[in-house]
Image: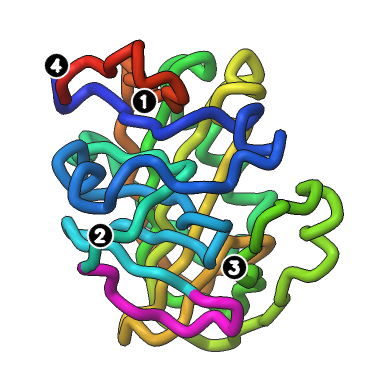
Amino acid sequence: MKRNCIFQVSTTDFLLKRNYSGFVSIKQLLKRGDFGIGTFSGLDGEMIMLGGKIYRANHSGEINEVKSSKKTPFAISTFFAPKKDFPIDNAGNKDLTQIMLKQFIISDYLYAIKIAGFFQMIDLRSGKKQQKPYPEFKTLTKSLSQFKLEHIEGTIVGFYFPESYKKISGNGFHFHFIDKKFEFGGHVNDFYIDMAKVEIEIKTRINLKLFNPSPILKPLND
């Protein structure tokens, strides 16, 4: 049952209402998965969880492994054990997403997705750490760093959520990228694949960890 579950810290709707302070530690998050995406307290860069390790892409897209007690205000993780895979050559972002939708058993389910291979181009973004009082999300998106990598080998980590999850997890595909050398990464805006392997795993449950501001209401044990 644990393998079929996605563990999520907070919700998209809660995050977008300027709730950027982390409340779940990286140590806790690693107990709930070995694969995932997210961000850090104050929206301090983009999170990539791969192979049971957590990496941070900073404002410049540079990668460092996170081993400290950093916290996250929003993350999505799972134990990744794909049951389906297929090769893909010469395909852009829109092409691949349409192919994947056809591969899904039921489009209303949740899916964890890994795309590893060679990319002709990948367009990424990341952001600087925000300070209180936190700005509106729409305002800070204007200050995000945008950068494009070409002819690079790496891995896209991400998830698919149906329309009904829009306020919970965000609907559609959400991808983060890290290169093979663990030097560059970020949130994926667009890409074009030369040659890659796509792995998909269906998920049937989601476990939400919600922010608890009250000292009276004690959270359940993890």
The residue that disc 2 covers is 69
Classed neighbour count for the residue bearing mark 4: other residues with Cα under 10 Å, few (<14), some (14–19), many (≥20): few
C-alpha distance separating marks 4 and 3: 36 Å
Q: Which numbered mark, 4 or 1, is in the foreground of this view? A: 1
Q: How many angstroms separate mark 3 from mark 1 (CA)?
A: 23 Å
Label placed on residue 209: 1
| On screen, residue 146 above or below 69 | below
Task: State the SS at label 2.
Answer: loop
Category of crowding for the residue at label 1, using alpha-carbon neighbours closer than 10 angstroms: few (below 14), some (14–19), many (at least 20): some
- Residue displayed at 72% across by 52% down: 133
The span picked out in magenta is 58-67
Q: Residue at x 57, y 58 (%)?
A: 43
Marks 4 and 3, the one that precedes in the sequence: 4
Disc 2/disc 3 C-alpha distance (Å): 16 Å
Query: Tag 2: residue type?
Result: Ser
**Residue identifier under label 4:** 1
